[in-house]
Image: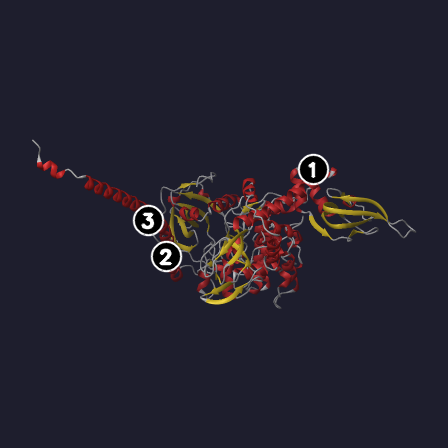
């Protein structure tokens, strides 16, 4: 017997299709909802990271306010001095921040990939791009071959009328050359400029991740050529490495150099000058006194001799690429027996007798024996406190926060077992370090500082870690930093500037002897200890550079960077000599020699060089001379870049009468002796995570 009820509940064909359609719609809607939730989760993660950063900043700034009211008692009426007791970067002014571009490793695979990005261009397009570079105040200083290589990698893009190329307040990694059309430049909504064909813009973005201070929009449909930061850095690095490889190969081809070890060849290359000659130029003339040796890198020369009583010159030889001349001058023969003239354009590698002998005999090493001896015997740092030998992070209690930085804050801490033992604890958030790509820089800094036992560098005693933080335990230098002293006084007198400059010279000498480049010398990074002696603090810019090799990271503080850092020529310890000259200038004047209203103007002024700068009349003649000799455009022309290293600075007239041994033995009376009153009792009950363990030598275990 059929059941009417069951027939009632059985769907008809149309109803079945409707139900299935509804199910499909629901499944699709569910998938959309799942994707929406996934995107929301990703957004929530990003917002949580941003919120963590802001919460941390707010909390530390509140503690900073408390410190302003109650903290250290330092000399002078200005409370601004007391606010600068922390050994971290001063981030109040964007122009004074330390800038570090993302790490760049010039591996062969990157070069191979880049070579396939080269775009075909008409001769007219290549001419336009190269003309744009040559009239750009910043990039016209690049070599011809570098501009050609960059041109080859640029690719074309089109922008429709009314669309933005870049927008104010955003960041980017591309520079542009306009080929066709017109572009409007606006700032704060106001039109300030119009770009025409052959104009270049966005160039600072090729150096580091900056924020655009203006907008560029298309007035008409436009065609542009563009290149990104990674490609730009890769091209310049490849040009430099290719030139280096070619030069080392040429040195290796000289018979009397073939037996030299690789490290000596690298040192020799580091002191070789590349010199260009035009057609018809005499490289040297018969009878001239000479002390230089030449290797032909490109082109051809004619060797001639004029016999006594005869007017015409006899051609003795034609020399071309990979051949050499003038080698007898290296061994002491000073009179040139022949003429050597360039036939067409010629490039030679040139090295002088003194440099050659210094390198070969070993006195041109990066660690001159007398300097090494002074750093190791006369400059004796205090021994590490015995109480730290077996200490763990739970043995320290927090007195107060000293300051806040981009990725960290610094606490003043004391040992619970001995409250007179006061230190600084720099607490870094791993999440912020990793998200900003700074892991490599932070670990490199820790590794170098753990080995840097120098009385003119803030001592790093121990490093701890837990799941979320890295903890660096350092000595507490509570006398403020030189930037705060400059803000209070305006500028320093000659004697004070001399004392603090000498402290930095000793710190850099110690680092350079060990193949370490600092790359961020500035008043903010020099703190005063309780006796008033200056010490360099740790910096993410620290890096080891092998002898004869270079590094290419855009790194440092605008206004202090050497030209070779800005132009991606590759740099080494010589970059610190430039920064030392700028440091002197600021101490004596209270301002930077290379300054401007925006980043581009600062960078351009730096590249133009010290000879374009008007020195204050208050500078003594010897101070001007030392600054100019430290800030030479060519790294090898800078004072102390050659074999005598730091002794060249110590013997300069500006330091006449200065007691260097007394400085190293801490027998001098500093210009300012800070008055630091520390609470010798627990200020808070705050302790660090007991789960944090000491990080020994396995720096990769982050």
**Residue sticking out furthest to the front:** 13
Residue 53 x %, y %: 38, 53
Q: Is residue 560 above or below residue 385?
A: below
Which residue is at the front of the view, 395 or 598? 598
Circle 2 Cα neighbour tier, 10 Å, few/some/many (<14 / 14–19 / ≥20): few
Q: Secondary structure at mark 1?
A: loop
**Residue sticking out furthest to the left:** 1
What is the C-alpha distance between the residues marked 3 and 2? 26 Å
Residue of label 3: 40
Q: Residue at x 62, y 47 (%)?
A: 240
What is the C-alpha distance between the residues marked 2 and 1? 59 Å
Residue 617 x %, y %: 62, 68
Q: Secondary structure at mark 2?
A: helix
Q: Tag 1 or tag 2, which sits nearer the N-term?
A: 2
Circle 3 Cα neighbour tier, 10 Å, few/some/many (<14 / 14–19 / ≥20): few
Residue 143 x %, y %: 64, 52
Which residue is at the front of the view, 488 or 468? 468
Residue of label 1: 260
Circle 1 Cα neighbour tier, 10 Å, few/some/many (<14 / 14–19 / ≥20): few
Q: Where does the C terminus fall, quadrant-wise? A: top left
Residue 470 x %, y %: 42, 45
What is the C-alpha distance between the residues marked 3 and 1? 63 Å
Q: Is residue 235 above or below residue 597?
A: above
Q: Are marks 3 and 1 in contact (CB under 8 Å)?
A: no
Tag of residue 58: 2
Q: Secondary structure at mark 3?
A: helix
> Which circle, 3 or 2, is nearer the viewer?
3
């Amino acid at each position: 017997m059929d059941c009417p009820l069951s027939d009632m509940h059985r769907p008809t064909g149309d109803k079945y299709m409707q139900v299935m359609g509804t199910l499909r719609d629901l499944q699709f809607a569910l998938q959309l909802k799942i994707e929406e939730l996934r995107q929301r989760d990703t957004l929530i993660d990003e917002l949580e990271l941003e919120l963590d950063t802001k919460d941390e900043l707010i909390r530390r700034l509140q503690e900073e306010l408390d410190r302003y009211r109650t903290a250290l008692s330092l000399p002078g009426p200005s409370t601004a001095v007391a606010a600068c007791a922390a050994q971290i970067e001063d981030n109040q002014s964007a122009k004074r921040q330390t800038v570090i571009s993302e790490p760049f490793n010039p591996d062969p695979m990157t070069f191979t990939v880049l070579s396939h990005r080269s775009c075909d261009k008409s001769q007219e397009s290549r001419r336009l791009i190269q003309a744009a570079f040559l009239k750009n105040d910043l990039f016209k200083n690049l070599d011809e071959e570098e501009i050609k290589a960059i041109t080859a990698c640029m690719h074309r893009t089109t922008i429709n009328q009314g669309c933005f190329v870049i927008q104010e307040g955003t960041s980017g990694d591309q520079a542009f050359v306009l080929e066709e059309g017109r572009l409007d430049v606006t700032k704060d909504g106001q039109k300030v400029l119009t770009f025409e064909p052959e104009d270049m813009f966005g160039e600072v973005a090729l150096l580091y991740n900056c924020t655009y201070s203006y907008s560029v929009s298309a007035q008409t449909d436009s065609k542009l050529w563009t290149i990104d930061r990674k490609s730009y850095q890769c091209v310049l690095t490849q040009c430099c490495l290719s030139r280096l490889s070619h030069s080392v190969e040429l040195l290796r081809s000289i018979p009397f150099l073939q037996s030299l070890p690789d490290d000596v060849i690298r040192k020799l290359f580091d002191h070789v000058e590349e010199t260009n000659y035009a057609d018809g130029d005499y490289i040297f003339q018969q009878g001239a006194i000479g002390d230089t040796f030449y290797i032909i890198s490109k082109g051809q020369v004619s060797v001639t001799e004029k016999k006594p009583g005869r007017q015409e010159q006899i051609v003795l030889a034609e020399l071309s690429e990979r051949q050499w001349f003038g080698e007898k001058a290296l061994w002491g023969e000073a009179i040139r027996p022949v003429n050597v003239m360039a036939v067409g354009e010629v490039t030679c590698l040139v090295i002088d007798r003194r440099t050659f002998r210094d390198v070969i005999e070993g006195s041109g090493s990066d660690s001159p024996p007398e300097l090494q001896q002074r750093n190791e015997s006369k400059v004796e740092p205090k021994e590490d406190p015995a109480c730290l030998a077996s200490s763990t992070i739970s043995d320290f209690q927090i007195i107060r926060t000293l300051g806040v930085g981009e990725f960290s804050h610094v606490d003043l801490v004391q040992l619970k077992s001995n409250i007179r033992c006061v230190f600084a604890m720099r607490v870094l958030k791993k999440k912020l370090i990793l998200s900003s790509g700074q892991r490599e820089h932070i670990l490199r800094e820790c590794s170098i500082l753990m080995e840097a036992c120098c009385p003119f560098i803030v001592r790093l005693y121990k490093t701890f870690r837990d799941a979320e933080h890295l903890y660096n335990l350092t000595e507490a230098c509570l006398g403020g930093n030189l930037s705060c002293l400059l803000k209070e006084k305006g500028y320093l007198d000659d004697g004070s500037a001399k004392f603090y400059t000498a402290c930095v010279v000793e710190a850099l000498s110690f680092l350079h002897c060990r193949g370490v480049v600092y790359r961020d010398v500035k008043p903010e990074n020099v703190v005063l200890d309780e006796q008033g002696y200056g010490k360099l603090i740790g910096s993410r810019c620290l890096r080891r550079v092998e002898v004869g090799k270079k590094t290419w990271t855009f790194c440092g503080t605008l206004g202090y960077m050497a030209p070779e850092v800005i132009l991606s020529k590759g740099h080494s310890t010589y970059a610190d000599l430039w920064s030392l000259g700028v440091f002197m200038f600021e101490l004596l004047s209270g301002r930077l020699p290379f300054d401007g209203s925006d980043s581009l103007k600062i960078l351009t002024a730096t590249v133009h060089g010290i000879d374009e700068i008007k020195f204050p009349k208050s500078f003594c003649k010897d101070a001007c001379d030392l600054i100019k000799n430290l800030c030479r455009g060519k790294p090898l022309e800078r004072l102390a870049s050659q074999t005598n290293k730091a002794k060249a600075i110590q013997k300069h007239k500006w330091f006449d009468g200065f007691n260097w041994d007394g400085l190293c033995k801490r027998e001098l009376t500093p210009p300012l002796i800070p008055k630091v009153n520390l609470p010798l009792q627990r200020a808070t009950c705050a302790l660090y995570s007991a789960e944090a363990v000491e990080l020994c030598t396995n720096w990769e275990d982050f």
